[in-house]
Image (tube, helix red, strand yellow):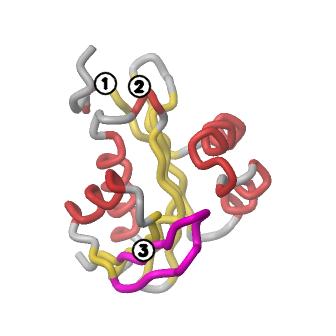
Amino acid sequence: MSRGPVHEQVSISELSWWDLDEIADHDAAIFGPTAWTLTYYWAVRAQAGTVMFAARTATSALAGWIVMSTAGGEADVMTIATTEAGRGRGIGRRLLQAGIDWALSRGAEVVHLEVDEHNDSALGLYRSFGFSEWGRRPDYYPGADAILMRYRP
């Protein structure tokens, strides 16, 4: 089976409240001890200035999600992930673009994120968008620093 980009076979839309259980389950499987809980997803969803997008395959399988927030002229990629069904298919790129587009439509002039220093695929994606490192948080993740990155369109 080919794992190249399959843009036509994936839809991205705002996440519905009934998707939160599934998202939290996948988050736990992907991020382990640093995963967001279902309660935390509900709390973030209730905050003004946030959006959650989900990517689904043609068979409705969850392929990934992104959570964004904005305040003033700044936006934050709060979390982004792809499931096994979504990896290597350009879905992370599409989710990040959807999040950036949403943030820019709300007046964001800069987009921030933090990433595990060992997450080479995510670092490659962010750099390809034009994100640059501006700082670090030592030992933010288990056994790893968080690289602080920003993007100015």
Q: Which residue is mark 2?
A: 57
Q: From what the image shows, is residue 108 above or below residue 21? A: below
Q: Which residues are magenta?
A: 134-149
Q: Position of residue 117 (x, y in %)?
A: 42, 66
Say which element carries label 1.
Answer: helix
Q: Are marks 1 and 2 in contact (CB under 8 Å)?
A: yes
In-front residue for pair 20/72: 20
Q: Residue placed at 32% from the left, 51% from the top?
A: 121
Q: Position of residue 17 (x, y in %)?
A: 68, 43
Foreground tag (1 vs 3): 3
Q: Is residue 88 left or right of residue 36?
A: left
Q: Is residue 111 left or right of residue 7?
A: right
Is residue 3 found inside the magenta-colored segment of the image? no
In-front residue for pair 101/57: 57
Looking at numbered disc 1 in the image, what kind of residue is underneath it? Gln
Foreground tag (3 vs 2): 3
Q: Residues within 10 Å of mark 3 (few under 14, many from 20)?
A: many
Q: Which residue is mark 1?
A: 9
Looking at numbered disc 2 in the image, what kind of residue is underneath it? Thr
Q: Is residue 70 left or right of residue 105?
A: right
Q: From what the image shows, is residue 40 above or below residue 114? A: above
Please, what is the dominant secondary structure of the magenta stretch?
strand
**Tag 2 or tag 1, which sits nearer the N-term?**
1
Q: Position of residue 107 (x, y in %)?
A: 37, 78
Q: Residue furthest top?
A: 1
Image quarter of the N terminus? top left
Is residue 139 found inside the magenta-colored segment of the image? yes
Q: Which mark is residue 87?
A: none
Q: Is residue 12 left or right of residue 25?
A: left
Q: Are marks 3 and 2 in contact (CB under 8 Å)?
A: no
In-front residue for pair 10/88: 88
